[in-house]
Amino acid sequence: MKTSDFLKITPEELAKRQHDELNAFVVKRLRDVAQLIEDGEYCTIDSPFKDIIDYSPAGDCAGCDNIFICFDDVFGGRRPEGGGHDIQDCLDRLEKLARIIDEPRWRCEG
């Protein structure tokens, strides 16, 4: 893409593209997990599907000892402060992107 074309993309358009891509990814990840459960593959930490779940020990500043559906691959790796990205991180990002799309405060008038 040429720089001039890239610079024509508004923040709202960019946020919409990111929102739609993340939304589709989250829905697919959740459907994949549901399908694995239906197929009797329970995504345990030792399973071949362990790349879509992660273990969060108590004491990592992210709540109790638990196993969760992991979204680190969406965010480019683990959080800088430690711990994996979970569904709440995705929902938070989707909400922020939706606000940018719905509130075009970036436009200059006049």
Image: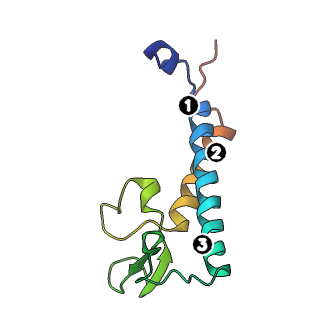
Residue at left 51%, top 80%? Answer: 43
Which kind of residue does numbered mark 1 sit on?
Pro
Is the residue marked by circle 2 packed among few (<14), some (14-19), or many (20+) residues within 10 Å? some
Q: Coloring scheme of the render?
A: rainbow
User: For residue 33, which numbered disc appears in the image?
Assistant: 3
Residue at left 63%, top 59%? Answer: 28
Give the foreground label among 2 and 3. 3
Query: Which quarter of the rendering shows the C terminus?
Result: top right
Give the foreground label among 1 and 2. 2
Which of these two is toward me, 42 or 101? 42
Is residue 61 found left or right of 26 in the rendered image? left
Residue at left 58%, top 63%? Answer: 29
Which element carries disc 1, helix, strand or loop?
Answer: helix
- Rendering coords of residue 15 (x, y %): 58, 38
Residue at left 54%, top 59%? Answer: 90
Which element carries disc 2, helix, strand or loop?
Answer: helix
From what the image shows, is residue 74 above or below residue 8? below
Distance from disc 1 to disc 2, alpha carbons, whole Å, reads 14 Å
Distance from disc 1 to disc 3, alpha carbons, whole Å, reads 33 Å
Which kind of residue does numbered mark 3 sit on?
Val
Distance from disc 2 to disc 3, alpha carbons, whole Å, reads 20 Å
User: For residue 20, which numbered disc appears in the image?
Assistant: 2
